[in-house]
Amino acid sequence: MEWNKSELAPDDVKSLTEKYGCDPLTASILLRRGINTGEEICYFLEDDLRHLRNPFGLPGMEDAVERILAAKEEGEKVMVFGDRDVDGITGTVLLTDFLRRSGFDVIWWNFPDKDEPYGLSIKAIETFAANYGTLIITVDCGISNRDEIARAAELGVGVVVTDHHNLPEHLPDADALVNPKLPGRYSFQQLSGCAVAYKLISALRFAMKSEVYGEPICLINVRPSNDAMIIEIAKIKNLCLVDTLVESIVPDMVNIHSTRLPEFLAGQQILCWDLPVQQKLLTQAFGTGVEIQMLDIAEEIGKAIPQTAGKSLLRLKEMSKIGKYSGKSTGELDVLINLFISFIQKKENIHDEENEADLQLAALGTIADIMPLRDENRLIVRKGIEAMQKKPRPGISELLFKLDLTGRPISSEDISWTLNPAINASGRMGEADKAISLLLGETVQEREALASNVIALNDKRKALVEEVYRKAEPEAYKSLSVYSGNMAVYSGENILPGLMGLIANRLSDRFKTPSLAASLNGDRIKGSLRSARDYDLSFMLEQCADLFLRYGGHDFAAGFDMEQSNWDTFLKRLITIAANMEFKAPVEEALKIDAEIPLAYLSKEEDDPKVRGKKDLYLLQLADRFEPYGEKNRPLLFLSRSLKINDIMLMGKEGLKHVKLTLDTGKFKWPAIYWNAAERVKVDFDKGDTVDIVYTVNRNWFNGTVTPQIMVKDLKRHL
């Protein structure tokens, strides 16, 4: 296997280190991963929830909030309708729980029919309308349900869509559409469905408790510049920057009414920093006859944020943490904007205990839907996991205990491989209501019983997937020759539709090609697609859109429903599509090394930031800093040379396939695991050899004891 460590210019490493205050090794890793802008770096170095993007920046958010608040005021009956995977389940729970606690008359849809199609259904709408319901809020679905939403309108039922899937050609005519992929000023599109629901709740909570909700506010700053006065104004609404105005005024040369200021400031509450200074500068600009009614916020902010008290904006600019990541020159007005937003967030206690509980579910949904762990997704997952460890919310707590995940730190890998599959199984097995009821359960006894039920469903799901996959793998292998080696296809009769995505995913991992798994049920076919090698599935789906009853999803994971009469036509079209597929990524990429670690650093200890007076291995702390790991943020991959193999032991539950090593670094002996490498022992390496290794590091927890551990990806005898 090829080892690839890209070279870096020392000046680039030094520049990043000095600008962002990180150590050279961290800077090198960031640069090798192509993380080189302030906005990207921020989410790797900072943990403060102030860096989450404003929910009101999402397209359609204000319309959604107003419609939902109107429903509360009128006492309307509301239904939350979510998809049946982890993302939809967690989002449904999140929104239902919040609305209940906020006094809404709310229910959630209970998927009584295992074969009910994904997405908002006519059956759910008509049932809800018959029970005098008037508002549906979708979670993780709805953006493609144009006909269904039209039917809701016919029945007098409003619909607020919150979704994150790719946009169809024709959008539904809903009361509000909230989706990060819609055109607008929200610059991060890769939120999960549950994270979009979390954003909606954040906006609703702000609207319900903040005195500045909906209020037009102008922040003004006047500063001298050579022979002129620079007047800068930012228009703020719901803590979002709406507009800015900059006027350069030469004193005694222009009347204020000849400027854009009166029109821009009309009807706004005007706030400034250090009123006496601002009034003096305005007088110099326009003379004594001009007075702008302003409120000074410096003293109030100084009380809430003591480090700002008595300081000028110019001085605070030098201290600004947010400003250094902006990617542009930070001015005094930028500082004032950031101060005002931070002040309101602190005053309103936006990031309270309820918010921490909400983040736990948003973290699960983000990981489950394989969202890229970049940008604000890193904060959502990192802080959600922290909250889960500190005080797991009801339902999650019972699951963690039964899955033996209590009493130790939880990683994104634990969630991906243990917690999320248990929740996901209920939806996969056609019983999504079990997981929702667990996470909304009011008593410990109820939740414990449901947690056992959900885990039992997961065990059953595992067995069924293995049974189906044993049939699917050889059939899919045969299909490769039909589809130019570029696609694997399997179809079977009367398979639970919820299992198809898992089968497609395993096939794509096995054959390194886009894969399709389909269930033939009567006159309907349900298919799931999973991509490989960065192939965009939306291109394939669009070429077959005329054959589907419905389709949608993401670029790399999608699904469809079709009538069986179209199946043969679809397969024939797929042959042509597959023959012309072009892949962005090779079948097997080289090992991309993030940093070469000298032996001394393998033994280096530093103070543990979590436990006072305790030391921790530096390399483990470095790995912690880049958590959470997952999509678009693989675990750090290190290279070290000249490690001696002190001991070798073969291991494995079903045959001795794996290798356990003890690696000597001098001061410290690292235990190491090398999966599926037994056949290489005494061939490529042996006890007593000195080797170079490519590896990741983690902590192994066993019987309450934690041990640092190396996970070997490849090794070679040292030359």
Image (spheres, rainbow, N blue to C red):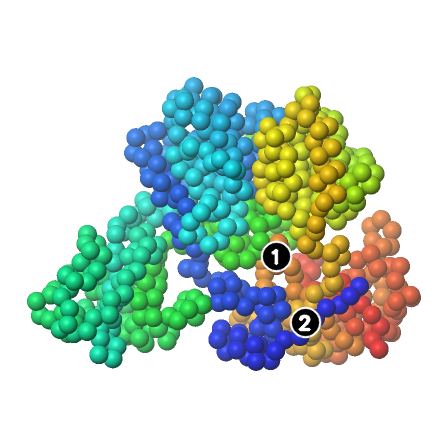
Q: Which mark is residue 482?
A: none
Spot occupied by residue 374 in the image (x, y as percentages of width and height):
55, 57
Find disc 1 in the rendering and name its residue.
Answer: 632
Query: To which quarter of the image does residue 29 belong?
Result: bottom right
User: Is 525 placed left or right of 328 in the picture?
Assistant: right
Residue at 84% of width from left, 59% of height from top?
677
225 versus 623 height, above or below: below
In the rendered picture of this protein, how many numbered marks are placed on residues?
A: 2
Closer to the camera in the image, 356 or 37: 37
Q: Position of residue 418 (x, y in %)?
A: 65, 47
User: What's under tag 1, amino acid-wise?
Assistant: Lys
Check the image and name the residue furthest to the left. Answer: 289
Q: Which quadrant holds the N terminus? A: bottom right
Residue 221 image-quadrant placement? bottom left
Residue 470 visible to an observer of this rendering:
no
Where is residue 597 drawn, in percent x and y? 69, 75
Left or right: where 393 falls relative to 520: left
The 10 Å Cα crowd at callout 1, few under 14, some 14 to 19, many 20 or more, is few
Q: Amino acid at mark 2?
A: Ser
Kindly identify which numbered label has been placed on residue 6. 2
Which dot, 2 or 1, sits closer to the camera? 2
Q: Is residue 472 above or below residue 125?
A: below
Q: Earlier in the sequence, mark 2 or mark 1?
A: 2
For the residues marked 2 and 1, what is the alpha-carbon distance in whole angstroms?
18 Å
In the rendered image, the residue lying farthest to the right is 682
Query: Which residue is at a point 88% across and 67% down the rendered structure image?
Result: 684
